[in-house]
Image (spheres, rainbow, N blue to C red):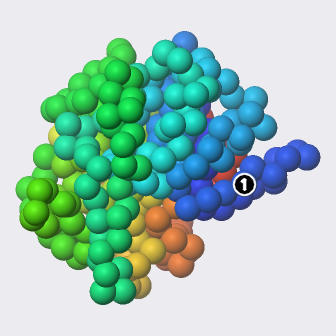
């Protein structure tokens, strides 16, 4: 399989083209004869980058939304304009109701309002584990207590007139079975990168996790916290991590220091083969 980063925070110069970046994440994944889009950043930039890289969005067979935040979902309207057939797989817990407290005020960080109704015929809501194609799985969080992570991140859901701490039931992992082990994508790993790895390993007893790919949401964490999570990642036995977006440059440097050649930096235009 081959995965190409269409959007990440870091731009990349490839040949005569600049593959631009934005705060967001998007992947074009080729697995056998099937093509997948995971997330679409926060704008149409992913589509422009796909054009520069020669990757045909109109041929995508499956689209997946990792979670219900704008910087992963808001480019999907552009995708639907490019592709008339692929369905978008998202968790049953996805709604237009994600907020965080920033500088003492409520800030909306969710899917663009009206999107879920406008494109309801293109959406496939997922519960539990789902094999969307042979060897390709969508996994939910099943680790208890993740509302503690939501409280730490000051992230909440608006349910009617109530504010509920986000437990990230709207977040999912996209997992590919390969001869070398499981390749796991989780775009922000709000529940913890080590948690994501353990959940994938538990879903496939006896299978090793070859790689974890995505943001680790460490851009706002202390050095002590990052070093501790690096140790927990090491303890999972994962062979490699590829991380960027909400991980942050400083945290990535610490992960690289702790994990050495096991850690790699994502950037727009990067290709990974497994």
In this view of the protein, can residue 56 be seen by the observer? yes
Q: Nearer the viewer, residue 69 or 13?
A: 69
- Is residue 186 visible in this depiction of the protein? no
Residue in view at x 45 percent, y 58 percent: 215
**Numbered disc 1: secondary structure:** loop
x, y percent for residue 126: 23, 30
Q: Residue furthest right?
A: 16
Check the image and report above or below for 52 versus 253.
above
Across and down, in percent, residue 107 comes to 35, 71
Q: Which residue occupies the foreground of this view, 207 or 20? A: 20
Left or right placement of residue 143 versus residue 183 in this view: left
Residue at 21%, 66% in the rendered image: 156
Viewed as shown, does residue 222 lie left or right of 248? Answer: left
- Choose between 68 and 10: the one closer to the eye: 68
Q: Is residue 56 above or below residue 220?
A: above
- At horizontal 47% and vertical 65% (from top left) the residue drawn is 246
* Image quadrant where one finds the N terminus: top right
Residue 113 horizontal/vertical position (percent): 36, 49
To which quarter of the image does residue 230 belong? bottom left
* Residue at image location 71% in from the left, 42% down from the top: 49
Q: Which residue is mark 1?
A: 20
């Amino acid at each position: 399989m081959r995965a190409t980063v269409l959007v990440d925070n870091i731009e990349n110069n490839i040949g005569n083209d600049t593959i631009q970046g934005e705060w967001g994440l998007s992947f074009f994944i080729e697995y056998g004869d099937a093509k997948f889009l995971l997330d679409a950043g926060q704008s149409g930039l992913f589509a422009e980058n796909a054009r520069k890289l020669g990757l045909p969005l109109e041929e995508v067979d499956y689209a997946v939304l990792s979670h219900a935040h704008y910087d992963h979902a808001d480019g999907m309207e552009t995708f639907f304009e490019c592709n008339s057939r692929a369905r978008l797989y998202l968790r049953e817990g996805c709604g237009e109701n994600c907020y965080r407290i920033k500088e003492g005020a409520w800030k909306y960080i969710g899917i663009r309002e009206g999107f879920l109704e406008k494109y309801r015929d293109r959406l496939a809501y997922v519960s539990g584990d789902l094999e969307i194609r042979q060897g390709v799985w969508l996994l939910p969080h099943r680790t208890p207590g993740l509302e503690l992570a939501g409280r730490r991140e000051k992230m909440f859901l608006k349910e009617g007139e109530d504010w509920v701490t986000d437990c990230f039931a709207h977040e999912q992992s996209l997992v590919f079975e390969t001869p070398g082990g499981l390749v796991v994508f989780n775009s922000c790993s709000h529940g913890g990168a080590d948690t994501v790895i353990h959940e994938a390993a538990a879903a496939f007893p006896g299978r090793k996790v070859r790689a974890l790919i995505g943001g680790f949401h460490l851009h706002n964490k202390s050095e002590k916290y990052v070093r501790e999570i690096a140790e927990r990642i090491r303890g999972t036995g994962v062979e490699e991590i590829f991380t960027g977006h909400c991980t942050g440059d400083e945290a990535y440097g610490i992960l690289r220091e702790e994990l050495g050649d096991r850690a790699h930096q994502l950037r727009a235009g990067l290709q990974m083969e497994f």
